[in-house]
Image (cartoon, helix red, strand yellow):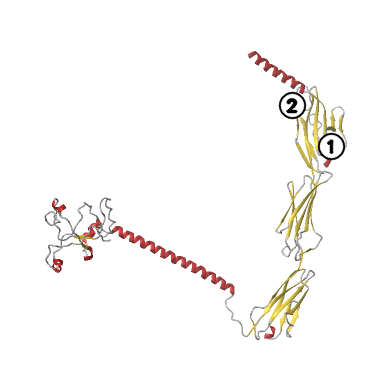
Amino acid sequence: MAGKLQKGWFGGWWTTGVCLTALSYVPGLWAQMVLVNDTVSGYIGTDVNLHCTLTNPSLGMKITQVTWQKATNGSKQNVAISNPVMGISILPPYKDRMVFRNSSTRDGTIQLSRLKLEDEGVYICEFATFPDGNRENQLNLTVLAKPTNRMQATTSLLIAKAGMTEKIVVATCTSSNGKPPSTVSWETKLKGVAEYQEIRNPNGTFTVVSQYRLLPSREAHRQQLTCVVNYQLDRFTDSMTLNVLYEPEVRIDGFDGNWYLNRKDVKLTCISDANPPATSYQWKLLNGSLPDNVEVQNSTLFFKGPVTYSLAGTYVCEATNTIGTRSGQVEVNVTDKPLPRGIPGGIFGILGVVAAAALIISVAVTVFIVYRRQQKGRSDTDNDLIDLPPSHKPAPPPPKRKQEMKSHLTAEDIQVVHLDNMKEPEEEIQKLPPQPPYYDMAATEPTPHSDKMNSGNSKDSDVQYAELDTSALATSPSPRTSIHAGGDLVEYATIQANLC
């Protein structure tokens, strides 16, 4: 197996060596020995240098010729030849525009002057050597063309018309004969749309055309529109100001709402916004004729003499320019006496806002103070309850008895006492000395609630009478019970009700 591996390794290298030896005679294999610029660019009409040098020549190698060729449609066309014996030969169409920069056979750099668009392409620099053969490399020449830029306003009049919906071209920006094509854009506050078209010219350059469309309006008048062209690192701008024609927009000034009897020197003025400006004004009184003491001076209506009731009415002013006619009107009222002049409405508005703000702030502060006081009162009450001595603190609810024990006396447990042994009248029974109260014989734990109940003075409504069998007490005498024979009835017993 080792023999097979060694044979395979030797066979592989032998094959590689044979291939490299054979390929060494193929032109262009050792192109890395010829140094060129990968890409060269220049503008039309300028000069460029196409660098080409042979490096690391082998010992004894002789350069016999340097040839420049241009790749055209898959074939090579000789452009310039430098031969140490035959001299230099420049072929058309480069005869008057190309020269070798150096006389050295190892430097084949050439200079191409007055670039043309057709000069663009792939150029091959080849060194013919002996005995090693030819060495070559190639570069790409790109010819640039600076565009011609211009902006042109439309020759049509921009007229704003009511009901108009179709946008029209207001300006055109053109970047022509550029290579590569330019980028065209617009800068404006107008609400229009831009259209773009790119055209490839027969000579390989490009023309970019952009049209800006807009619906003419009064708002578009005197707005600026700027065309921007970006090409490589260059920036071109051109601007124009729109001139939109529109009919007059009319308003009437002069009536302040305080025309009163015998007031003097009043007038009405017709103010119009129009492009072109209004050339004529017409005044009239709606549903009547103008007063006799009225003098019309172009856009102003002067009232001579004192104000009378005859001046009241609706006045109409019509303004006309070359685009159209529009009108405005005002209603004039005449009062007996002057209206009181108070604080201007604007000041009233400001004072109202300030007062409202102050009211809101005061309400918010009041609510906050009340809330804080309530919180403080609750906190003080909680602190007082914590600091009270045990005797003043409210008693906790009594603990629940065990299920087998009765928590309350039922109607069956309570009976009316019939004192058979008592012969005294009922009045004397009430005079008997108080006896110890009756307690349940079941063992209970004292609680603060029960202590409080025992310590208090019981009312008559809190005492009930029950009949008790003393047979159970005979076996377990208690100092709290009277000594009777088993089965006797206690004279009376008191039961204290649960005090809530």
Estimate the x, y position of residue 50 in percent, counting from the top left: 79, 36
In this image, 375 relative to 413: left or right?
A: right
Residue type at the position of mark 1: Met
Q: Mark 2 sits on what residue?
A: 56
* Vertical position of residue 363 compared to residue 231: above or below: below
Quadrant housing residue 407:
bottom left
Quadrant housing residue 372:
bottom left
The N terminus, quarter of image? top right
Tell me what residue is drawn at x 76 percent, y 53 percent.
Answer: 195
**Viewer-proximal residue among 57 and 42:** 42
In this image, 8 relative to 136: left or right?
A: left
The C terminus, quarter of image? bottom left
Quadrant housing residue 152:
bottom right
Spatial CA distance of label 1 from label 2 is 27 Å
* Vertical position of residue 453 compared to residue 33: above or below: below
State which tag comes first along the sequence, 1 or 2. Answer: 2
Q: Are there few (<14), some (14-19), or many (20+) residues within 10 Å of tag 1?
A: many
